[in-house]
Image (spheres, grey):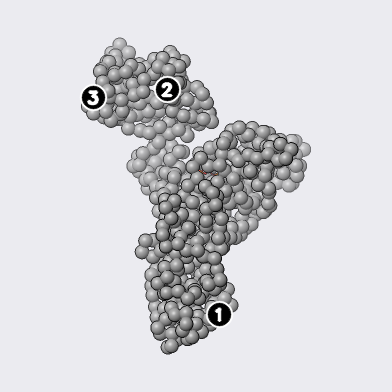
Amino acid sequence: MRQSKMLIPTLREVPSEAEIISHQIMLRAGMIRQLAAGIYTYLPLGYRTLRRIERIVRQEMDKSGAQEIHCSALQPMELWEQSGRASAYGPEMMRISDRHERQFALGPTHEEVFTTHVKNEVRSYRQLPLNLYQIQTKYRDEIRPRFGVMRAREFVMKDAYSFDASLEGLDMSYQAMHDAYHRIFTRVGLNFRAVDADAGAIGGEGGSQEFMALSEIGEDTLAVCTHCSYAANLEKATAFYVPLELQSAGLSPTKEQVSPVKVATPGKRTIEEVSSFLSVSQEQLLKTLLYEADGELVAVVIRGDHEANETKIKNVLGVGNLELAGEAARQKYADLPVGYVGPIGLSDLGIRVLVDRLAASVFDAVVGAGEVGFHLTNVRPGIHFNIDQTYDLRNVVSGEPCPNCQSPLEFYRGIEVGHIFKLGTKYSSTMGAKFLDQDGKEKVIEMGCYGIGVTRVLGTVVEQNYRDDAGLVWPMSITPYHVQLIPVNANDQVQQQIAADLYERLLAAGIDVLWDDRDERPGVKFKDGDLIGTPLRITIGRLAGEGIVEYKDRRSGAVDQITWQDALTRAIDQVKSGIMRQGNEGEGRI
Ligand code: ATP
Ligand code: MG
């Protein structure tokens, strides 16, 4: 393509609204423009790259045996009522009504729609398994759209849904998607890790994994074992734990032997303040957090040096909504004072107390006294306050033992680019998607669902492939153009002729070329080239008269002066092998 004919509106200035590098680069390179908060238009360069990513997704999905369909983004609200998610999905769902006041959702996801079609079309086990997918626009009224296309209100998702006759079948469908995702993220050139994940609002009991692109700007924290293959989202990562009996072996004091001692801690509310005031370690303090869980007050007791894990707490309680209790809720129950609440006496107020496993094993703990300005010392969990059962309620911390092999865990930041779930019968049972098995018995279909944020992948590739010293360098597999041709002087006949020859021959070899034929200063062309990210650059300059051009591999930084004919063959080889090589990179490059 001749650059003079293209709409590539590059910007010199860093747009003030863009906080992260990929958002800045995508705006500066003229790939995208924002139309409204979280709503973007993909300009030629951005759209071209997006289509290349979609192509890889499509190829790998088809290879896995999945079939592409295309659904409407508009979904009748009744479907969401049937699945029971109409209200559960909350304000993130964009709702509209037609001229007859019929309610529709602009689809945030399509479990209901796919389940409905399969319910209507599938009767017999002979029609299973089935995996259907689409690449389509999704709408979510994100509370905080940000980071450009990473968290948008309109975005492209590849969503697939598998339908199986048995749990073993579901396991196979899930594994096939896991493997396809692995190939997709490898081919698009991401550095990623698959991690165990919480199933969240989409639900399902069977398990779920997220594909995380490693990046400092990632919103998720990953706990990865330094030794074995254990890797989990922090929301999900299980805390290693030695059972209580072992820890307290030989120590079973009775109530009579010790009693809590009330000590004044005036104005000391935080863990740091109380621990330094009383000269006790944070590990010895127990904090009692009050939550409203689906409207009910619940107390959570964890060690002072730990953070509560709200996903785990939600799962233990089986609630959808969990928030730290506000003033009103505290007042309803004896005006529980912030910073001084302790576990003793809470059950008498009808408040359920959940105790973390490690908190339960703290010997001689310090807890809030339930009275402003006081704490209790010498408190023995299970003796001075009742513990029916203990749970894993905290975030693991970096360096603590892996739950599998007890080697230290390391933390990374990650961007979630894909998520796979075993749904089981969560949707098929509520929506009545059934089939007749070999014996003519009616059974409920086992489902899985599998999403890739296609537009988020685009932003993530930019984020991972930008270097301050080299600019953006696209992976060969998805670059909008493989080679950029830059004749330094637009009026030099020899330079123009070599550029034209190279252009024709590269195109004939199936290479995508961006020919910067604009009458601009060389500096401008090079700057735009760095923004656009083309991996190979052939500059035709001073030595054009001798048939010599400058060949630059922008990823390695290597620059060579070679004949234009050598540049041609080298570019063809490098593009072809570069696309193939992408297959050897990918997961595990931590
Ligand atoms: P997140 O935790 O980032 O909000 P999610 O759990 O809501 O993601 P899913 O419902 O699993 O996401 O959607 C499948 C994929 O779609 C995600 O893995 C992500 O890559 C992408 N995605 C989700 N929300 C957005 C968004 N607002 N903008 C762009 N991509 C998104
Ligand atoms: Mg979300």
What residue is shown with label 2?
327
Amino acid found under the numbered disc labelled 1:
Arg
Between residue 163 and residue 46, name the one nearer to us: 46
- Is 356 located above or below residue 386 in the figure? below
Badge 2 marks a residue whose secondary structure is helix
Residue 278, label in figure: 3
> Does label 1 or label 3 sit earlier along the sequence?
3
Task: Tell me how far mark 2 sits from mark 1, CA to CA.
Answer: 73 Å
> Which disc number belongs to residue 302?
none
The residue at 40%/80% (across/down) is 561
Residue 126 position within the rendered picture, expressed as x and y whole percent measured from the top left: 74, 46
Residue 587: x and y in percent read 46, 54
Nearer to us in this view, 219 or 191 = 219
Q: Position of residue 213 (x, y in %)?
A: 46, 52
Instruction: Please state which of residues 482 and 14 is positioned toward the viewer in this rendering.
Output: 14
Taking the spot 40% from the left edge, 32% from the top edge, the residue there is: 308
Q: Quadrant of the N terminus?
A: bottom right
For the residue carrying disc 3, how many other residues have a C-alpha within 10 Å: few (<14), some (14-19), or many (20+)? some
Compared to residue 62, the image places residue 88 above or below, namely above
- Amino acid type, mark 3: Leu
Crowding at mark 1 (Cα within 10 Å: few <14, some 14-19, many 20+): some
Q: Residue furthest bottom?
A: 546
Q: Which residue is mark 1?
A: 505
Q: Please say if the residues under marks 2 and 1 sit with CB atoms less than 8 Å apart.
A: no
Which image quadrant for residue 420?
Answer: top right
Label 3 vs 2, first from the N-terminus: 3
